[in-house]
Amino acid sequence: MAKVTTGTGDTGYTGLLGEQRVPKYDPRPETFGTVDEATSALGLARATTNDPRVKEVIYHVQQELYLLMGELATPPENYEAMGLRITSEHVQSLENIEEELKLEVNIPNKFIIPGDSIGGAALDLARTIIRRSERMAVKLLHDGVIQNGEVVRYLNRLSDLIFVLARYVEVKSSLAQRPQEGE
């Protein structure tokens, strides 16, 4: 059985990937902790849908976010050895999925107030957490704590994709609620 409680964080420090320990309020654990929040919010969204395509997209993104968290938790001296890296291919994949979804849903040119469906609202919540993690990652990049700009690009594109996915879910939800012909 996995040991859940280690006690190593009881003094307010947490380990990065390697030997380094930093305060829990350090920008790195703050950022990967926020990405973890986004992953959980995406899990809520995934649990609310019966659409296999939506489930697949969300699950794929959740897996990639674990890679991203690993990269954020890796100090520079261990970066190459760990091999955890978000690449331009990860970003391109998000862009491709977004473009496919936009072919099936009209994105209105206006502000969207979340809440038209439970699934859409859960995705919108995840999107806002992703945006917060993006702002935090930008600070890490600008401060020289991380060097891979693809992390920021990934989070930026991901928030766009999740916005489109929320609209897709809402359109599918509204179609499912319409009375069928002859009813």
Image (tube, rainbow, N blue to C red):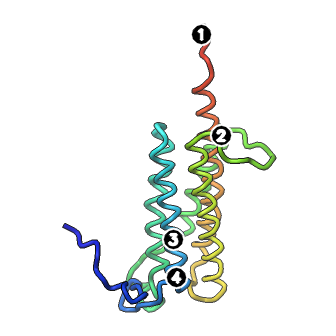
Q: Earlier in the sequence, mark 4 or mark 3?
A: 4
Q: Earlier in the sequence, mark 3 or mark 2?
A: 3
Nearer the observer, 49 or 152: 49
Amino acid identity at mark 1:
Glu
Label 2, label 1: how many angstroms apart (C-alpha)?
Answer: 24 Å
Tell me the residue that label 2 is attached to: 116
Nearer the observer, 132 or 165: 132
The residue drawn where x is 62% and y is 50% is: 98
Dot 1, crowdedness within 10 Å: few (<14), some or many (≥20)?
A: few
Quick one: SS at disc 2?
Answer: loop
Label 1, label 3: how many angstroms apart (C-alpha)?
Answer: 50 Å
Q: Which mark is residue 183?
A: 1
Asked whether, in this view, residue 101 is left or right of residue 49, the answer is right
Asked whether, in this view, residue 81 is left or right of residue 115, the answer is left
Amino acid identity at mark 3:
Ile
Label 4, label 1: how many angstroms apart (C-alpha)?
Answer: 56 Å
| Residue sitting farthest toward the left | 1
Nearer the observer, 99 or 135: 135
Quick one: SS at disc 3?
Answer: loop
Q: x and y percent of residue 41 in the render? A: 51, 57
